[in-house]
Structure formats: structure tokens, C-alpha cells
Image (cartoon, rainbow, N blue to C red):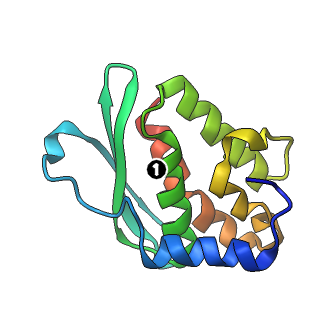
Amino acid sequence: MPTSINDKLKREIIIDHYSSPRHKKTPENINDYQKIHMDSVSCIDNIYVYVKLDNDKIVDACFDGVACAISTASTDILCDLIINKTKAEANYILTQYLNMIYEKDFDDSVLDEAIVFSNTYKQAARIKCATIGCNGIEELIK
């Protein structure tokens, strides 16, 4: 996905992942997953992030709880990006995502739809929302 997509398309992608998240669920066999609770004092975000590993590979990732549009969409997109990746590959993706959010040099070739959050730095209050799921995933796959 190009970094120069227009704002209308960015909003459409965010709303799509907010209104129909692909990875918002509590896993059926929860004992097979690592989980972490993530919340925010500045937003409604209160989610659990789940990651299922098979050796070094992420075989599933999901989240559940209450979250704003930015948190829901970013976490959903990041789950898409890390499933079937090794921990090293996932960490690289998450690092590039955070670099983008914090206005550092980043490799956009691994971000796909996550690129829609490229302007988040312009809204400082939304940075926490856009990174809550990322930070949870990062903690789980250390």
C-alpha cells in the first residue's frame, strides 16, 4: 500500500477495521494464548491482547474489550500483519509501525494497511490509541 494514499481512503480503512474487526474475539482455548491487559486513562481503551505462538511463529493474534476507533482499527490491522510471522519478523513490523507513529525513518514496505496511521503524530492525543495494541503485542512476543 503506498504511503501517499488520500485521507478519504485512510478514513475508510480505519472505519472498516473499527466496524468489522477481523481479529476482535476472546480465543476459545484461551490457555493456548499469552495475554496482556492494556488500558488507557485518556480514552475508553480497555482491551486484552492475545497471541498464540508455535515455537517461534505467531499462529494467531486477537484482542477483545472496549476501544475507540483508532485503537480497534490499529490493533486489528497489526494482528493481520503479524499472523504467520516469526517473532523476529513481527518485531520488525512493530518497530517500523512505531517509527512511523513517532516520525522516525521507517520501512513502509512491511506496513500494508497500517500506513493509514501515518499522520497520527499530528494528533498527540491519538498516539496512545494507535499504539496500545502494538505495545501489547510487543510485550507478549519479547
Give the x, y percent position of residue 33. 25, 40
- Vertical position of residue 68 compared to residue 2: above or below: below
Q: Where, by quadrant of the figure, is residue 90 drawn?
A: top right
Q: Which residue is painted at 39% across and 33% down in the image?
A: 58
Looking at the image, which is closer to me, 103 or 2?
2
Q: Secondary structure at mark 1?
A: helix
- Vertical position of residue 129 compared to residue 115: above or below: below
Give the x, y percent position of residue 106. 80, 41
Please tell me how many numbered marks the rendered image carries: 1
Looking at the image, which is closer to me, 77 or 123?
77
Q: Is residue 26 visible?
A: yes
**Left or right: where 98 falls relative to 48:** right
Q: Residues within 10 Å of mark 1 (few under 14, many from 20)?
A: many
Give the x, y percent position of residue 65. 33, 69
Q: Which residue is mark 1?
A: 79
The amino acid pointed to by label 1 is: Cys
Q: Is residue 49 visible?
A: no
Q: Which residue is painted at 57% across and 32% down in the image?
A: 91
Give the x, y percent position of residue 99. 76, 45
Looking at the image, which is closer to me, 68 or 76?
76
**Left or right: where 53 falls relative to 17:** left
**Most distant residue in the top direction:** 55
Q: Where, by quadrant of the figure, is residue 114 drawn?
A: bottom right
Q: Which residue is painted at 60% across and 57% down in the image?
A: 131
- Vertical position of residue 19 compared to residue 71: above or below: below
**Left or right: where 32 falls relative to 64:** left
Q: Which residue is painted at 67% across and 71% down in the image?
A: 126
